[in-house]
Image: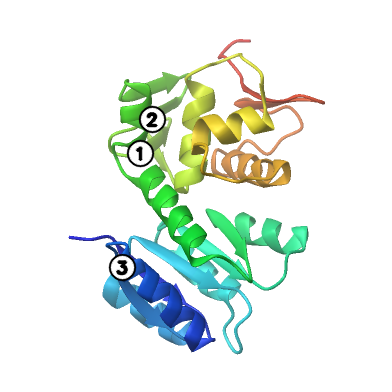
Amino acid sequence: MPPRVLVVDDEEKIAEMVGGYLQASGYSPALAFDGAQALSSFAEERPDCIVLDINMPGKDGLEVAREIRKSSNVPIIFLSARAEEIDRILGLELGGDDYVTKPFSPRELVSRIKAVLRRAAPESLEAREGARLIASGDIEMDTEKRQVRQRGEPVVLTAAQFDILAFLMRRPGRVFSRAEILEGAAGLEYEGYERTLDVHIKNIRKALGDETATPRYIGTVRGVGYRFIEPGA
């Protein structure tokens, strides 16, 4: 079955254009033109990825994302006519995996969808790194099932957050720059910004209950980047 992608945009021409490119690229697109339709289509279609416009009348894309994140970790790529950093950060804090500003190249968007789906696929990290299981202290990761457990309890992460945590856990103690983490965890196709990674790290820490001045898992190295803290270090 081809991957199902839900495209949500109140500008019908944009949604239809993206849908056409997706279909031509081997995907199965579904279209929605407002927030209510988006939630209904999400429940019916159970898409593998969502392309979600932020600036819609009524229930906007951020509200839709909040509702979806209550029950699903499906990859979300936000679309917006606004390029301000605060909008990008807000979208990522709500669990978005990527953020594309209008006007955009449909081919680039399809490429980003492909990259997000590849990161979310069960075999993506295993194929790149080899080992299926990663464990450190009270955190365990299964890269085949894309599952994280902390003290035996499940931890919910987005695809991007999962890959970032796995990248750091495979190399405990080593300090990486933001660019190195983005490239190593997300791949060369991911055009991230340094602030983007900071938001992902913040969300990972929140998911792990590690929002303290002295984090136990991911440490900040001022002026350089981040490292995964070895137990007992």
Q: Label 1: which residue?
A: 147
x then y, percent, for residue 154: 39, 41
The residues bearing labels 2 and 1 have C-alpha atoms spaced at a distance of 6 Å
Mark 3: few, some, or many residues within 10 Å (few <14, many ≥20)? few
Between 136 and 95, the one lying in front of the other is 95
Mark 2 vs 1, N-terminal side: 2
Q: Report if the CB atoms under discs 2 and 3 are less than 8 Å apart.
A: no
Mark 2 near mark 1, Cβ–Cβ under 8 Å?
yes
The residue drawn where x is 59% and y is 89% is: 58
Mark 1 and mark 3 lie on one chain; the one further toward the N terminus is 3
Instruction: Work out whether 60 lies above or below 191.
Output: below
The spot of residue 69 in percent (x, y) is 47, 62
Residue in the picture at 17% in, 60% down = 1
Q: Amino acid at mark 1?
A: Gln
**Residue 170 image point, x, y percent:** 47, 20
Question: Position of 40 compared to 220: left or right?
Answer: left
Cα separation, mark 1 vs mark 3, equals 32 Å
Q: Amino acid at mark 3?
A: Ala
Name the residue tied to disc 3.
24
